[in-house]
Image (tube, rainbow, N blue to C red):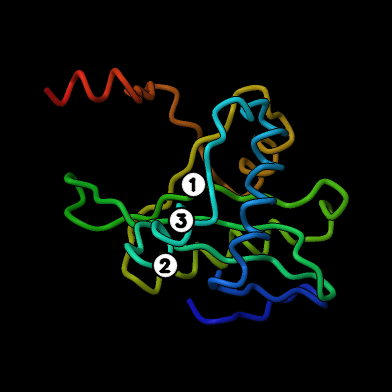
Amino acid sequence: MEERKTNVEGLILKPVAKEDLSVLKDLLYELAVYEHLEDIFYVTEEILEESLLVKQSAEAFLAIYEGKPVGYSIYFMNFSSFLGRAGMYLEDLYVKPEYRGHGIGLAMIKTVARIAVERGCRRFEWVCLNWNVNSIKFYKSLGAKPLDEWTTYRVTDDDLKKLAE
């Protein structure tokens, strides 16, 4: 992604570069705290560099508002076997609480949606914690619909290693 201006005065969405990794890590930690998940936060700048810049497992941009980093988004391509096409998965969309309500989150999610459309994606998905009613309200206002008939399953750490045996 190249740097993008938005319709929000003073907001620029900047692709994450090596010099931004410390800022991104701090923002990621803020989201972990907000979601009460800081006990599983293991990210380092080195991990981010390898994942985002070397392996390019995902893409990320910072929301720079009036010269200050106030949020970020991480997204990556996935695939729908039934559509036979790529889709876009939004891993994170985070705006610092004091900057919410200025249209920054909307500009960010619209940007990822535009990238998805530019790449020929037929769908755009993400998950949201059930207790996060403000985010749920925001997502529904965009026309997003919850997929109540699906349950997310996850295998991690030792269980993942055991499964891989």
Residue located at (55% from left, 48% from top) = 92
Q: Residue 50, located in which quarter of the rendered image?
A: bottom left
The type of residue carrying mark 2 is Leu
> Judging from the image, what secondary structure is the residue with disc 3 in?
strand
Mark drawn on residue 91 = 1
User: Is the C-beta separation of discs 3 and 1 under 8 Å?
Assistant: yes
Kindly identify the residue that appears in the image at 82 percent across and 77 percent down: 10
Classify mark 2: helix, strand or loop: helix
Looking at the picture, which amino acid does disc 3 mark? Answer: Tyr
Residue 29 locus on image (x, y percent) = 66, 42
Residue placed furthest toward the left: 165
Q: Earlier in the sequence, mark 3 or mark 2?
A: 2
For the residues labelled 1 and 2, the Cα–Cα distance comes to: 16 Å
Q: Amino acid at mark 1?
A: Glu
Label 3 packing within 10 angstroms: few (<14), some (14-19), many (20+): many
Residue at which label 3 appears: 75
